[in-house]
Amino acid sequence: MKPRERLSVVLSGQKADRIPFAPAIYEHKAFLINKSPSEVCRDQTLLIGALEAEYRTYQADLLVVGVDVYNVEAEALGARVEYYKTNEVPSISRPVLVDREGIDDLQIPNPADSGRMPLMIGVGREIARRIGDEVMIWGAMSGPFTLASCLLGRENILLMSIEDPDWVCKLMEFCTKVLIEYEKAWIEAGLGVIVFDSFSSPLMISPRSYRQLVMPYHTKLMGYLRKSGFPYRPLIIGGDTTKIAEDIAKTGANFILCDYNADLKHYLRVVKDAGIALRANINPGLIYRGPFDKIIKAGKEIIRQGNNLPRFILGTGVLPYDTPQEHVMVLKSCTERTSL
């Protein structure tokens, strides 16, 4: 099977020739062409080349257009992003909002001409033209709480969630409108999207705050994807999200994540009869360090647990820039059914 067919079959709830493999490759794709993340994320030719290198190297079952995935929308709204000559991932050095009143001055950016949004969509179109018949290609997007955190600053958004949750809801409503416009642009380009909102994990906010301040807006984003006719509604929240697993499953997402430090047995129970695909992650630190036997042991164990779930996918946390390629390939080898 080609990767595109394999993932499509599994997401529909059928058994493929092997478990799909979807490692989280963002800054690591720059390493594959010997460039820095800051170079690749701002250059259309380099990013296309990095995506091609990623596909040639790993033949993974999903290709995601993105490098510094949490910066793009915030930068389009006026946040300052720090780019580096080293192999560090670009980061926001200055948020947009300095007080509550500033929210009224924000304008929804046009994905056709705002910041790096058009670059990302243009790269998606071109890479789809080249290899889209072989592999699904989805554009990376921030989730609303992550975008709100980038606009205001992490500490400030946590403080405001306690002091003025109504104002936070106003900011979340704005962020959701921004992201729906970006979703729309990706879909109109003939591509899929994958929503990342790891700032909303229980490591950042309480499960109660998630339900009150975030879940309604995740539901809106997933609702837009459903209405658009896009069949896949991925919502990826990293970290130990065990305490909000049932809530995530109720947002309308049909592709969710159990990160390496969450309770996989609990997640398997949550999604078992819900028609939801589950990507289960291996610790990226283990993949980076090795050795082979420990990677294989971890890979086989996670597949042993999830193998009976029709919509099960093996993934990784975000791989460090210079992760050894052979470590990723030995993990992929665990997905072959003959290796179980």
Image (spheres, grey):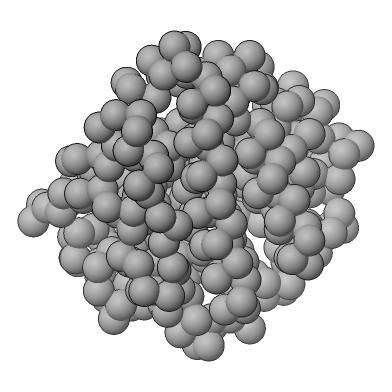
Residue pictured at 62% horizontal, 71% vertical: 187
- Out of 279 and 236, give the one closest to the viewer: 236
Residue pictured at 45% horizontal, 57% vertical: 108
Residue pictured at 49% horizontal, 27% vertical: 168
Give the percent coordinates (x, y) of residue 93: 18, 41
Q: Is residue 313 left or right of residue 82?
A: right
Query: Which residue is farthest right?
Result: 273
Give the percent coordinates (x, y) of residue 298: 55, 33
Check the image and report above or below for 260 versus 114.
above
Say if residue 110 shows up in the picture.
yes
Give the percent coordinates (x, y) of residue 56: 44, 74
Quarter of the figure with the N terminus: bottom right
Check the image and report above or below for 198 versus 89.
above
Give the percent coordinates (x, y) of residue 144: 52, 41
- Out of 104 and 270, give the one closest to the viewer: 104
Residue 333's image quarter?
bottom right
Residue pictured at 33% horizontal, 22% vertical: 156
Q: Is residue 292 left or right of residue 238?
A: left
